[in-house]
Image: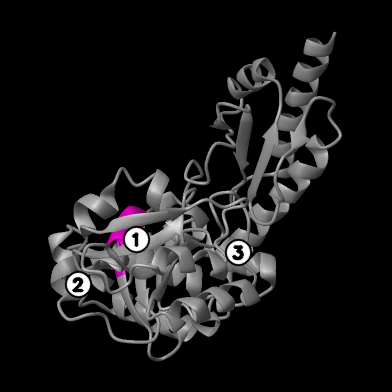
Amino acid sequence: MRAFASDNYAGVHPEVLAAIAQANTDHMVSYGADPWTARAEELLRVQFGATAQPWLVFNGTAANVLSIGALTRSWEAVITPDSSHLHVDEAAAPERMAGVKLLTVPTEDGRLAPEQLAPLLARQGDEHAPQARVVSIANATELGTVYSLAQTRALADAAHEHGLLLHVDGSRLANAAVALGASLAEVTVEAGADVLSLGFTKNGAMGVEAVVFLHEPPPAGFAWLRKQHAQLSSKMRFMAAQVVALLEGDLWARSAAHANAMAALLAAEVSGIPGVRVSRPVQANAVFAVLPRDVADEVRARFPFYTWDERTGEVRWMCCWDTTEEDVHSFTGALRDACSATAG
């Protein structure tokens, strides 16, 4: 199967598998007290600065929940776009596990603007209202857009001006950084972000993410918080080995650049098909389009993908580290044939 449904559909990069196999020798101390974890943490500090405090976890939901949970108390809230993964696709985990209220903001393209914070801060200090504490954004966003360095900095400055912290959901941070021609640090810590959920799984890992406190040490008790959320791996070396494989060289950037390039190719090819309209800017590895529902249903039987908006028929196509040009050509050929048959 070749799919455009999600970058989670892709397999594990061979270089990551090789690193896991290399870690699979002899006995090592458990729960992260091993050389692989030490090396992974060192590489994360190389990326984000000597003051960065990284913590490995199993998945993105945990990274997001732990990030905001560590920074908030039960009467506090998180401001986030209404299209954010945190709000739409975490099965209410932030509310259930972190115990915080999400204050959602409508956006046109998934990006939150500084001026949108003020209306949600009118009741700061009012004991009858939840108190905003964190602003959470994703880069790249759920709608495939990328925050520029200036946009992230402006949002961070606005948040800090009001005593708030900026959290970045970076499940596709590598794609955003490559799209901007920037380093991972430039799109986060140097742009003013305070804490990061750093994704590896969508970029070729088997299954590992990281919570990275970018400026300050984590709040007291974070080690216990990670343990309570069932995110402390006994055989941490195999998670850490994946991080080492992606960060020790340029694999993280190569994988993301390839996925972005395949999305650009896909957008260019489908734009010439009658009946298919690319509906959003293509800035990372996602392509959104509107096409006839019967065409979508016919083609997805061979190339799985998701309908994003049932009302409009908008769909989302994701490209991955292992998407090939042949995949794109075959997919667009199937779309062209289906559209021609429908028109005929």
Q: As shown in the figure, which amino acid type bears the numbered disc 1? A: Asn
Quarter where residue 88 is shown? top left
Counting residues from the start of the chain, the first of labels 2 and 3 encountered is 2
What is the CA distance from the residue labelled 1 to the residue labelled 3? 18 Å
Question: In this picture, which residue range is highlighted in magenta?
Answer: 56-65
Which residue corresponds to mark 2? 28
Amino acid type at mark 2: Met
Outermost residue, bottom direction? 50
SS at badge 3: helix
Tag 3 or tag 1, which sits nearer the N-term?
Answer: 1
Q: Using the numbered discs, state the Cα–Cα distance from disc 2 to disc 3 in whole angstroms.
A: 35 Å
Type of the residue with mark 3: Ala
The picture places residue 69, in percent across and down from the top left corner, at 25, 65
Q: Position of residue 200 (x, y in %)?
A: 45, 61
Is 144 left or right of 56, judged from the image as shown? right
The vertical placement of 290 against 52, above or below, is above
Q: What secondary structure is the stretch in magenta mostly built from?
A: helix
Which residue is under mark 3?
176
Which marked residue is nearer to the observer: mark 2 or mark 1? 1
Q: Can residue 103 be seen in this view?
A: yes
Local SS, label 2: loop
| Rendered residue at 48%/67% (across/down) | 117
Q: Name the residue under label 1.
A: 64
Reply above or below: 299 against 98: above
